[in-house]
Amino acid sequence: MRTILIFLIIFVLPDEYSANEPLNFCKFNSTISELPSTWSFATLDQVKLCFQNISVNYSVANETMKQLFNSLDFYSFLSIVRQSDYPYSMNINFREELSNILNQSNMNTYKNDYDFHMAVTLCFKKLKDFHTTYSVPNGYAQFHVLLPFILEFLPLTKQIKVQFGINLYSSIMRSNSNMNYTNQIVTTIDGINAFDYMMNFAEKYSIMSKDPSVRLNSVFREEFWLQNLAQYPLPLKSNITFTFLDKTETVTFPYAVVITKKFDQQSSIENDNRYSPSVTYTTRNAFSYITRLEKLSWYEQKTNDKFRFITGNNDTYYYVHESTNTAIIRLGSFDDQVSEDVKRVFLAASGTTLILDVIGNRGGSSCLAYAALHFLVPEYFSHRVLYEPFDGRTTKQLQTFATIFSFSPDSILDLRNMSSFTNMEWMEPRVNYTRGNTTDSYSMKWSINCDGQVFGMGKYWMRNESNTKYFKSIYVLTDGSCGSACSLFVSKLRYASNLKNIYGIGGGYFNYDSDLFESSSYAGGGAFDWNSIVTYHNQLATYNTSIDHLPTSAYLNLNVFEVYINALNKDYPREFLKQPIDKSLDNGDYFNIDQSLEKIINDDEKSSAHSLVDHSSTKIFLFNIFLVIFLMN
Ligand SMILES: *[C@@H]1O[C@H](CO)[C@@H](O)[C@H](O)[C@H]1NC(C)=O
Ligand SMILES: *[C@@H]1O[C@H](CO)[C@@H](O)[C@H](O)[C@H]1NC(C)=O
Ligand SMILES: *[C@@H]1O[C@H](CO)[C@@H](O)[C@H](O)[C@H]1NC(C)=O
Ligand SMILES: *[C@@H]1O[C@H](CO)[C@@H](O)[C@H](O)[C@H]1NC(C)=O
Ligand SMILES: *[C@@H]1O[C@H](CO)[C@@H](O)[C@H](O)[C@H]1NC(C)=O
Ligand SMILES: *[C@@H]1O[C@H](CO)[C@@H](O)[C@H](O)[C@H]1NC(C)=O
Ligand SMILES: *[C@@H]1O[C@H](CO)[C@@H](O)[C@H](O)[C@H]1NC(C)=O
Ligand SMILES: *[C@@H]1O[C@H](CO)[C@@H](O)[C@H](O)[C@H]1NC(C)=O
Ligand SMILES: *[C@@H]1O[C@H](CO)[C@@H](O)[C@H](O)[C@H]1NC(C)=O
Ligand SMILES: *[C@@H]1O[C@H](CO)[C@@H](O)[C@H](O)[C@H]1NC(C)=O
Ligand SMILES: *[C@@H]1O[C@H](CO)[C@@H](O)[C@H](O)[C@H]1NC(C)=O
Ligand SMILES: *[C@@H]1O[C@H](CO)[C@@H](O)[C@H](O)[C@H]1NC(C)=O
């Protein structure tokens, strides 16, 4: 086999390397015009040298572990992950998992600081819960490994193809050799069967969902081609090798690294890794930037013969399918920051049929999701309050933290009479559940109040008595990675009289269940970041507490309250249940979304044609009865 090595050495050696100045592994200041001027790029080798030179500080590691053990008192699913029911049947002793890391750390197993933090990150990933995560300190979170292509799974042939090369990768590597593999079928990656490679990646690193098909969807769509080093470990090798079906040669590409900052030395990264109350931890900047740069969002392009752009931005759009007048609403998130965009789009939309695209929606405000449900579903209009029940594991620590809600006394509703609690009765121990190997006390079930201070004071509602038009048919388009508030939205929309079908894009990875994967993910309930928990808890605690901020800028987030979808199961948290899609589209193209939309529109046309036929046969039937009656007279 002929081997072509495409290995471009763009290791632009900084001046210091040649001169008699000391080596500086952590200088990252190379830029190209495609990137913002405050960003930089590097090869993976350069980044490795830098990360490997930052050593573990054991007092930092000890304090980190101590706080992680403290955090377990706030984590709602600690006992259920020990033994959850079908279909996700988890069995994780999380306390023991953490204790393992502490032991390894005491035995100096971690070669460097990054290794230690990544071990914690990977430990949290076992929970497969996007709400309960640990991301390594903020300095490292600026680094993103970029691959040469975006891959696509073909459900019908079960093959993986190169969907397209990434332009930014070519620019960084100063070669467009990654651009001429479009539509090639990938057979192996790093010597491993390509599907097994992707499967392994999804199992180890994706926490998008408890459903393996949804994890794979998420990996193909975004997690594989851009890997933030806060959540995905440094690849072991510096390059990645592909083989293709119709080609004899093996092709190797070095990994590129996009850095959303410039660094001049190691101490700059170490500074960013230290705890600072002002740090805002974000890992999505590079993803959003590159998505726009590569023009990956079909909706953002606003040009298509068959679909007309009406309004929207910020991944919230309203389109109309010209020939059928089908309304299409893209909901990229339920974030508070886009709530005005969401409202505008809903209020502008009209017609009888609506397709809601929630692919990759990461949630946001639950009350915005409730407002959307209230707007779309006729039965929900008459509900005085729209709710699903929450509860909490009543540890002393959580009870202390929860008193923060008593400062806005209208925020928590009593489900017995739909009035606000004026005391903390809602967080008192009420029921014992034996989940896994332990029996814990849980509070009564209560609800958040979307008209209350904490939850927006009713600012999200958009339906009132004077607008009375509803869509007759609603379809949802999801890849399963519709999380948090989006999951609440879809889980509840499922029971609406005008919801016709939930369509799934992607999937087809496995034969069992004909791969009707989970329609939404991480419905958990109420999640909080550790710094907020610490701040409020310590202000409210009247006892001595060892609860403190992490010693670094690592980001810890926990699922604190759990939510139930009454219509699905009153007693088992939504997080551990499955509400599958209704139909698979047999299509794994997340970027040219018009094909999927047209399939749904086509199905809708067919089903309305059916109901016309039904209608006319009913007429004939009635006519016949009439005739019989007539004849009898
Ligand atoms: C490696 O780390 C040490 C200790 O922090 C530092 O003194 C040294 O300059 C670093 N080496 C390089 C080449 O960056
Ligand atoms: C990077 O830093 C070196 C040394 O400070 C400087 O000579 C070089 O011009 C910088 N490169 C860029 C692209 O800023
Ligand atoms: C370890 O971290 C602590 C807390 O940040 C700091 O006080 C100490 O100097 C560090 N130790 C070393 C050896 O860097
Ligand atoms: C970390 O904790 C272990 C015990 O858990 C102790 O033996 C070790 O000395 C501690 N290390 C530091 C640097 O505090
Ligand atoms: C960690 O080490 C302690 C003391 O050596 C031991 O009792 C415990 O079982 C170990 N935990 C794990 C998970 O290995
Ligand atoms: C890609 O393009 C380069 C030059 O443009 C060419 O040498 C190479 O053979 C092409 N590779 C493939 C797989 O077509
Ligand atoms: C790929 O990277 C490894 C080191 O990680 C190196 O030994 C090997 O030569 C590289 N392969 C190519 C083709 O560049
Ligand atoms: C929404 O879009 C507007 C206009 O394009 C922009 O100014 C604003 O920053 C965006 N908001 C968010 C949250 O992205
Ligand atoms: C609501 O019901 C609870 C329990 O029956 C009761 O304690 C509370 O006073 C009621 N609240 C109002 C406003 O009636
Ligand atoms: C729950 O368990 C605790 C401790 O075993 C017990 O004191 C309490 O009465 C139980 N509560 C209920 C409602 O059974
Ligand atoms: C808990 O698990 C341990 C070991 O798995 C077992 O020995 C013990 O009997 C269990 N306890 C209960 C109450 O089920
Ligand atoms: C009802 O909602 C419409 C928007 O659909 C708004 O224009 C109107 O002002 C609202 N009416 C009332 C009474 O709030």
Image: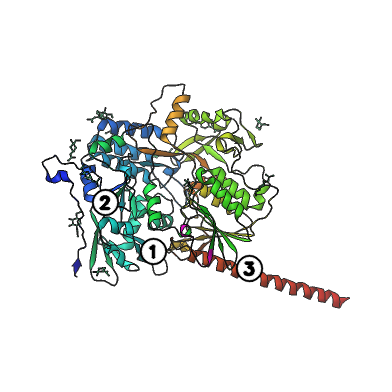
Per the picture, the main secondary structure of the magenta-coloured stretch is loop
Circles 1, 3 touching at the beta carbon (< 8 Å): no
Q: Earlier in the sequence, mark 1 or mark 3?
A: 1
Examine the image and state in which quarter residue 162 appears: bottom left
Query: Does label 1 point to a residue whose CB lies under 8 Å from ligand 6?
Result: no
Q: Earlier in the sequence, mark 2 or mark 1?
A: 1
Q: Is residue 305 magenta?
A: yes
- At numbered mark 2, what does the secondary structure look like: helix, strand or loop? loop
> What's the amino acid at mark 3?
Ser
What span is colored magenta in the figure? 300-307
Residue 570 at x, y percent in the picture: 57, 45
> What's the amino acid at mark 1?
Phe
- What residue is shown with label 2? 235
Mark 1 → mark 3, Cα distance in angstroms = 32 Å
Q: How many marks are shown on the rendered structure?
A: 3
Above-or-below relation of 260 to 270: below
Above-or-below relation of 282 to 629: above
- What residue is shown with label 1? 153
Mark 2 → mark 1, Cα distance in angstroms = 22 Å
Residue 208 at x, y percent in the picture: 42, 50
Residue 550 tag number? none
- At numbered mark 1, what does the secondary structure look like: helix, strand or loop? strand
- What residue is shown with label 3? 608
